[in-house]
Amino acid sequence: MTNLSLEHFENGIKVCQDENLYKFTSDAIKLAKFCKTKRTDNVLDMCAGCGVVGLYAYSIAPFNKLYFNDIQEKMCELINKNIKLNNLSERCTILCKHLNNLSKNDFEKPLDVILCNPPYFKLTGKVKQNENVAMCRHEIATNLQQITKKAGELIKVNGKFYIIIPADRLCECVIDLKVNGFEVKRMQICHSGENATVCLIESVKYGKSGVKIKVVNEMTL
């Protein structure tokens, strides 16, 4: 990693990125701002990339423990750099493995919250990006069904799962969540112009039915 850049955020967090690898987008920040955590929570940032979602969420409302999971070693190296950069080594653990291989035994205590900014573009042909970028953007190593299934396996009853998806995959995601024991409780639909672009979803494992929906213009976020 020789081509590094540093992002400084208004809340004091610093995030290092490699210009040759996948760089996070505004979706990561939207998700971090959308989630709600408590000081006692144990949190997993799934498909973490450089770790920006978990770190930004922690900077808004600090919690007990932050786990990161990513399949790519280069991204896990970046996560490690960013943990040290923000002096959070005592709070954080990195799990560099395929999410299908994650189990409850990987975590010291039950997970209260899972955050996920997934690789949410379906494979429809040959991907032109380099391998790192392709895996972060497209469903190559995992997919939406596997992600929701694993979240359902790992999180405790009444735990919260937060995910951001393209608007055109909303119905698919809600069905997958329901199949894996989640009830959608809160949704934020972002638009620019006439059409929705992305949806942020808060779901609760074995939660009661009833959802609150907010529609916002992306320019106001």
Image (cartoon, grey):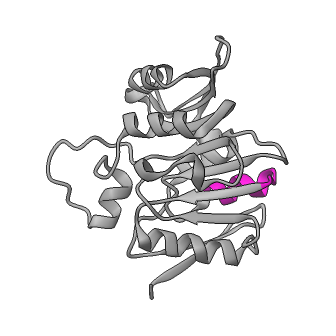
Q: In the image, is residue 182 part of the stretch drawn in magenta?
A: no
Q: Residue at x 69, y 43 (%)?
A: 110
Image spot of residue 116 (x, y percent): 53, 45
The furthest residue to the top:
209
The furthest residue to the left:
125
- Left or right, 127 with reference to 33: left
- Left or right, 109 with reference to 184: right
Image spot of residue 88 (x, y percent): 74, 70
* Above/below status of 59 relative to 144: below
The furthest residue to the bottom:
2
Q: In the image, is residue 57 part of the stretch drawn in magenta?
A: yes
* Above/below status of 88 relative to 154: below
Residue 16 position by quadrant: bottom right
Residue 14 position by quadrant: bottom right
Q: Residue at x 74, y 56 (%)?
A: 65
Image spot of residue 105 (x, y percent): 59, 51
* Above/below status of 46 relative to 24: above
Residue 92 position by quadrant: bottom right
Question: Which region is colored magenta?
Answer: 53-64
Q: Residue at x 57, y 69 (%)?
A: 79
- Left or right, 156 with reference to 36: left
Image spot of residue 143 (x, y percent): 35, 41
Main secondary structure type of the part rendered in magenta: helix
Q: Nearer the viewer, residue 146 or 170?
A: 146
Q: Quadrant of the N terminus?
A: bottom left
* Above/below status of 195 relative to 99: above
> In the rendered image, is residue 17 in sight?
no
Q: Residue at x 48, y 65 (%)?
A: 96
